Amino acid sequence: MLKVCHLYPDLLNLYGDRGNVIAFVQRCRWRGIPVEVLEVNVEQPVNFADIDFLFLGGGSDREQNLMADDLLKRKDSLKEAIENGLVALAICGGYQMLGRYYLTHEGQRIPGLGILDLYTRAGHKRLIGNIVIEMTIDGEPVKVVGFENHSGQTFIGNLNPLGRVLAGFGNNGQDSLEGVRYKNVFCSYLHGPLLPKNYRLTDLLISLALQRRGLHAELKPLNNDLEEAAVKAMVDRLL
């Protein structure tokens, strides 16, 4: 059985981010892979070492402030699990929180978890709209689509990006990079939500979670005609 943890579902569910958990679980169940979903809110216990897939979504500034102190208390156990191969997806505010800090317009540094060597600064322009990136999955270039809406500009230094921007803004609207991949952690600004729109990324996360659990990771094929058509329609529209 795979254990899925949705962190702060009551606070971080901007633009339907909960759909990422739904897509992960459904594509497991279609293959007969049993899944248990834990919804963990502020001050509720969780052992990250027992989790196979962790999802951390985005929220408004108010909601992110409400969970920030609680997440900082979990920093050490979360970092240890990530270093040990925890499969995780962090979107927008969750992505920013994994970095070192957020620099406000006033020059104030709001500390993050410092798990990933990246930082975010407040921008003067909102980066919003549909986006296409190209990432590599199983050695093959794959187009990934989504929707971004953020004013924060993230700079990832020497970390590997999730993908390269073909249409849209990405991390900061300057370097044509989007998101970050560190070990089995995937970070992105793509809302929408991301996984229902991109089945190949979803299946990659499932395979990695199975591998980490020591289970057979080759997935049973599914009919993805509808998903392929939806991605193609968006790619054709934007490119």
Image (cartoon, rainbow, N blue to C red):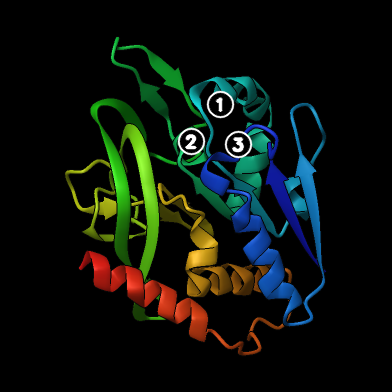
Tags 3 and 1 in contact by the CB under 8 Å rule? Answer: yes
- Residue 64: mark in rendering: 1
Tags 2 and 3 in contact by the CB under 8 Å rule? Answer: yes
- Please, is residue 89 above or below residue 62 in the view? below
User: Residue drawn at (41%, 26%), measured in percent from left and top?
Assistant: 101
Amino acid type shown at disc 2: Gly
- Please, is residue 97 above or below residue 49 in the view? above
Expressed as whole percent of the image width and height from the top left, the position of residue 19 reads 61, 55
Amino acid type shown at disc 3: Leu
User: Residue drawn at (63%, 70%), measured in percent from left and top?
Assistant: 206
Tags 1 and 2 in contact by the CB under 8 Å rule? Answer: yes
Tag nearer the camera, 2 or 3: 3
Expressed as whole percent of the image width and height from the top left, the position of residue 94 reads 52, 39
| First along the sequence among labels 2 and 3 | 3
- Please, is residue 165 above or below residue 148 in the view? below
Q: Which residue is mark 3?
A: 12
Q: Which residue is mark 2?
A: 93
| Image quarter hosting the C terminus | bottom left
Residue closest to the eye, 46 or 168: 168
Expressed as whole percent of the image width and height from the top left, the position of residue 65 reads 56, 20
Q: Left or right of 71: which side holds 59?
A: left
| Image quarter hosting the N terminus | bottom right
User: Residue drawn at (28%, 15%), measured in percent from left and top?
Assistant: 105
Q: Left or right of 57: which side holds 230?
A: left
